[in-house]
Image (cartoon, rainbow, N blue to C red):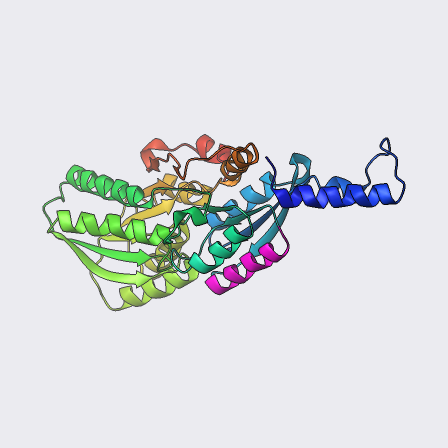
Amino acid sequence: MRPVKRWKRAAALVCAALMLGACAQKEPDAEEKDENLIVVGFSEVGAESDWRVANTESMKNTFVEEKGYELMFHDAKQKQDSQIAAIRNYILQEVDYIVLAPVVEVGWDEVLMEAKDAGIPVIVVDRMVKVEDDSLYAAWVGADFRKEGDTAMQWLEEELKRQGRDKEPLYIVHVQGTEGASAQIGRTEGLEAGLSAHPNWKLAARLSGEFTQAKTYEVVLELLSQGTDVDVIYCENDNSAFGAIQALEEKGVSYGADGDVIIISFDATRAGLTACLEGKINLDVECSPLHGPRVEKIIRQLENGETPEKNQFVEEGYFTRENLTEEFITEREY
């Protein structure tokens, strides 16, 4: 069932047409047709990574007029204040649904309550929100970031055994994403669990890469210049992995499947998988950005008066050079 406010907008147009003497058989004009569109306001984190760009494109390709939607898009440039302002603007414009890809998990209670009071369902995508009342959002869809981290640690343990290095000291450099983001929190928790389970694994350094190639290049280059021992670089997304690789190459340090430093990454974008197939990235754990159709499914359920599942985790895998082909990468959507 469509939200009441859209019905009221349509009713207002009908009343106006009747007052003007429009007959029932008359074709509705363009403005009247637009009232039948489902208006979706989407606030995106930004465009800091290939994954993020793919997520944005998935939304834009899904919520098109041909499918009955009007999409209002906002790029927050990684600023929570900007997202809060965008949500309030969507509320003022009486959109039908708000889709939020939050910068961080906390700080959403007040503005989501405003959306709830306005009768606008909020769908959270990718990163999670931590609120006191989970009725403030209709549903969340995204990855199990902790599971991704655990997957990486299990692979590393098995890889070290294969290499006969499982008893040796192992120095891990951790390049974190945006602090407070769900992906950062979950992937960090996975690494920390791995460190706790293996006394010979040591955290050589924890750096802030902000999910970007430029920032990661800067901090890893500085670390390598200090002569820090590095066996593994654990990057929380592909763009950070590219920055680490750039720094390693500049310093003449071998890495990847045939080198000294193991590179672990997340997202498995087409560019990341290409680097993986080339042996530059040892492991790339999948995190799908194709959330547009998933969000649309939730909206269709709400339109039909159904209650969608509250938390919807996406099934994902992981990749190494051994289980990749050029054909697979070429056919990949992101």
Magenta highlight on residue 36: no
Q: Is residue 90 visible?
A: yes
Measured along the vertical axis of the image, is residue 204 above or below residue 33? below
- Please state the extent of the stretch shown in magenta in the rendering: 79-94
Residue 79 visible (yes or no) = no
Above or below, 204 relative to 123: below
Magenta stretch secondary structure, dominant: helix
Question: Percent x, y for residue 79?
Answer: 47, 63
Q: Residue furthest right?
A: 21
Q: Quadrant of residue 202?
A: bottom left
- State left or right for residue 52 relative to residue 318: right
Location of the N terminus by quadrant is top right
What is the number of callouts on the image?
0
The image position of residue 224, as x and y in percent, is 28, 64
Residue at screen point 29% across, 41% down? 147
For image coordinates 65% across by 35% down, the residue present is 67
Residue 159: where, in percent of width, then height?
21, 40
Q: Position of residue 203 (x, y in %)?
A: 19, 58
Q: Nearer the viewer, residue 130 or 73?
A: 130
Q: Specify the quadrant of the image occupied by residue 246.
A: bottom left
Which of these two is toward me, 241 or 74?
Answer: 74
The image quadrant that residue 310 belongs to is top left
Left or right: 32 as drawn, with respect to 150:
right
Residue 84 among those drawn in magenta: yes
